[in-house]
Amino acid sequence: MIESISVPGPKGRLHEAAVAFPDDSAPPWPGVVVIHDITGLGADMHRHCQRFAEAGYAAIAPDLYAGGRVGCVVNALISSMSGKGEGYEVIDAARQLLGDRDEVDAQRIGVVGFCMGGGFALVAAADQAYAVAAPFYGAVPKEASRLKGICPTIAQYGERDLLFRSDAKRLARHLEELGVEHEVIIYEDAGHSFMNQLTGFLGKAGPYTPMRAQYDPETEAKAWKKLLEFFARHMPANA
């Protein structure tokens, strides 16, 4: 079951977060910080938190937006590209909040992100605070040095995503250069956002953009299986 809590951000702002905990395994559980795409903390992130809980992981998804929506989107995008700022502070606060719970093993926390959140997840994972990283179709820094110290990483992209498929290839080169255990998977028939059930304008227009953004349940099932297999090697859920 999804619960709602508050995560402290800079300047005294509180950020909403969705959390979910396993029902069928004994604590302490490994944890996962789930970072949303540009659409914010909505039904998709709740769904992903719940499926992590069902797989044996405690999950938290912080809302990086607080205050005016447009300004927050812009600030979050700038923060994700700069590697510093309010977005990263909120993500780290969510990680600490999760790790401070008695039921969670603070040494076994991973990070997952989607699109904008995938870019955040990659750079956040380079601070050595995470056991495993799983970005989906996220932006990748130009220089490998920005990812120095990153944990084992599984990244998944769509071949039909004309804007981000080159990032997948760049990430594979970076991780190879850094000697990091990794899997970078590109799905031939998928575009952007294959893990996200887009609605509204984005849901209607997405397939016609260069990103070919569209939910794809078949690719999602394959990607989720790959993610859990990678997590099981590096941060297994409790039996």
Image: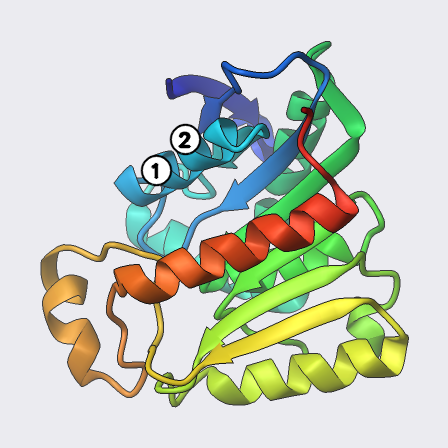
Q: Residue 47 carries which label?
A: 1
**In the depicted structure, whether residue 106 falls above or below residue 178:** above
Left or right of 23 in this view: 58: right
**In the depicted structure, whether residue 49 falls above or below residue 187:** above
Give the quarter of the image for residue 49.
Answer: top left
Looking at the rendered structure, the kind of residue marked 1 is: Arg
Q: Nearer the viewer, residue 49 or 76?
A: 49
**In the depicted structure, whether residue 88 falls above or below residue 59:** below
Q: How many marks?
A: 2
Q: Name the residue under label 2.
A: 50
Horizontal and vertical percent position of residue 97: 66, 22
How packed mark 2 is, by other alpha carbons closer than 10 Å (few <14, some 14-19, many 20 or more), is: many
Please tell me which residue is depicted at 55% across the width and 74% down the height of the picture: 139
Q: Can residue 3 be seen in this view?
A: yes
Looking at the rendered structure, the kind of residue marked 2 is: Gln
**In the depicted structure, whether residue 15 falls above or below residue 228:** above
Q: Residue furthest front?
A: 239
Q: Which of 223 and 78 is in front in this view?
A: 223
Give the quarter of the image for residue 194.
Answer: bottom left
Q: Is residue 85 visible?
A: no
Left or right of 192 in this view: 184: right
